[in-house]
């Protein structure tokens, strides 16, 4: 039986403030001893995820920019199942990785966000209109890391001028008319032109099943944009405080709950689940 772990990063495997995964070291080592796969599924960019992927040392693919792309190295055991996927997915090479492109390209998203901003009559500030320093302040990232966060390919994060359900609904409707979607992350809203994290996870799950046959899948996340991909896995974990809208988005009785967000909660959840397998 092959264990597959699909994990969000911010406020899940990574600490929300320090962006460190060190408190999850025991859980990560336990996965390594079980020869489990660890697939990161995140809103972060390729440039942000690649160093984390290298630090952790797993050979598995990762999903970036909310499912806009799947990246994998030549040596990944899933490679032949991914490059032969039908219908054919656009692909390109980037820094030693093959990237499967599932989303609308960034330039088109930036243009659409500007149009939506005018249509709804509200200033929607996206990463493309922010400097590295402004993104660093908004995310609490060092400036050099904020620069990597702005290297977008398939996803435009943006901020709303106010927390208004009415405005959010208007933005979503305007995006839908353009064949796009808006998803809520931990810190930002995101304009995307694809099916979200769940499409990428479904492709990888099928690849793992073709490669290994008998698999058990575990998913960990903390925010609403994680809930759809968590629906696809066998064992679901939601970290952090319960959300008011959660009963509608994700039936809480079907998930393991851990009130501690970030790598401490992640570590405990993974160790608890592994003890039952």
Image (tube, helix red, strand yellow):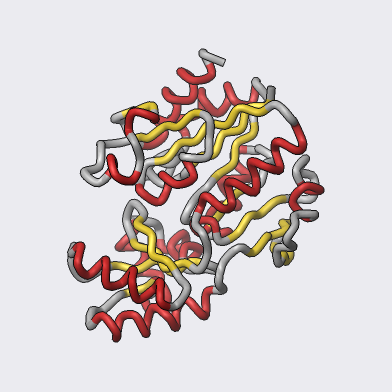
Please give left or right for residue 66 compared with residue 242 in the image. right
Name the residue nearer the viewer: 70 or 84: 84
Rendered image quadrant of residue 267: top left
Residue 123: x %, y % from top left: 25, 79
Residue 13 appears in the figure: yes
For the N terminus, the image quarter is: top right
**Residue located 54% across and 39% down the image:** 6
**Residue located 51% across and 23% down the image:** 26
Please give left or right for residue 53 compared with residue 192 in the image. right
Residue 72: x %, y % from top left: 70, 51
Q: Relative to residue 106, is residue 81 depicted above or below? A: above
Please give left or right for residue 226 compared with residue 61 in the image. left
**Residue located 47% across and 33% down the image:** 22
Residue sticking out furthest to the top? 275
Residue 96 appears in the figure: no
For the C terminus, the image quarter is: top right
Name the residue nearer the viewer: 48 or 200: 200
């Amino acid at each position: 039986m092959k264990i597959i772990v699909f994990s969000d990063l911010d406020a899940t495997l990574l600490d929300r403030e320090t962006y460190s995964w060190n408190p999850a070291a025991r859980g990560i080592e336990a996965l390594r001893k079980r020869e489990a796969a660890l697939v990161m599924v995140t809103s972060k960019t390729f440039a942000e995820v690649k160093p984390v992927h290298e630090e952790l040392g797993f050979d598995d693919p990762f999903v970036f920019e909310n499912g806009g792309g799947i990246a994998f190295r030549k040596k990944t055991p899933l490679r032949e199942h991914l490059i032969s996927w039908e219908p054919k997915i656009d692909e390109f090479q980037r820094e030693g990785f093959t990237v499967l492109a599932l989303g609308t390209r960034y330039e088109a998203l930036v243009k659409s966000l500007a149009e939506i901003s005018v249509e709804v009559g509200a200033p929607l500030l996206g990463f493309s209109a922010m400097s590295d320093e402004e993104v660093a302040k908004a995310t609490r990232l060092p400036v050099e890391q904020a620069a990597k966060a702005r290297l977008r390919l398939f996803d435009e994060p943006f901020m709303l001028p106010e927390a208004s359900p009415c405005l959010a609904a208007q933005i979503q409707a305007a995006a839908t008319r353009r064949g796009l979607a808006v998803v809520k992350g931990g810190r930002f809203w995101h304009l995307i032109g694809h099916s979200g994290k769940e499409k990428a996870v479904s492709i990888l799950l099928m690849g793992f099943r073709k490669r290994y046959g008998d698999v058990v899948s575990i998913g960990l996340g903390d925010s609403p944009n994680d809930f759809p991909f968590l629906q696809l896995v066998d064992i679901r974990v939601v970290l952090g405080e319960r959300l008011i809208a959660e009963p509608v988005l994700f039936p809480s009785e079907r998930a393991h709950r851990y009130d501690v967000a970030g790598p401490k909660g992640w570590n405990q959840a993974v160790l608890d689940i592994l003890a039952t397998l």
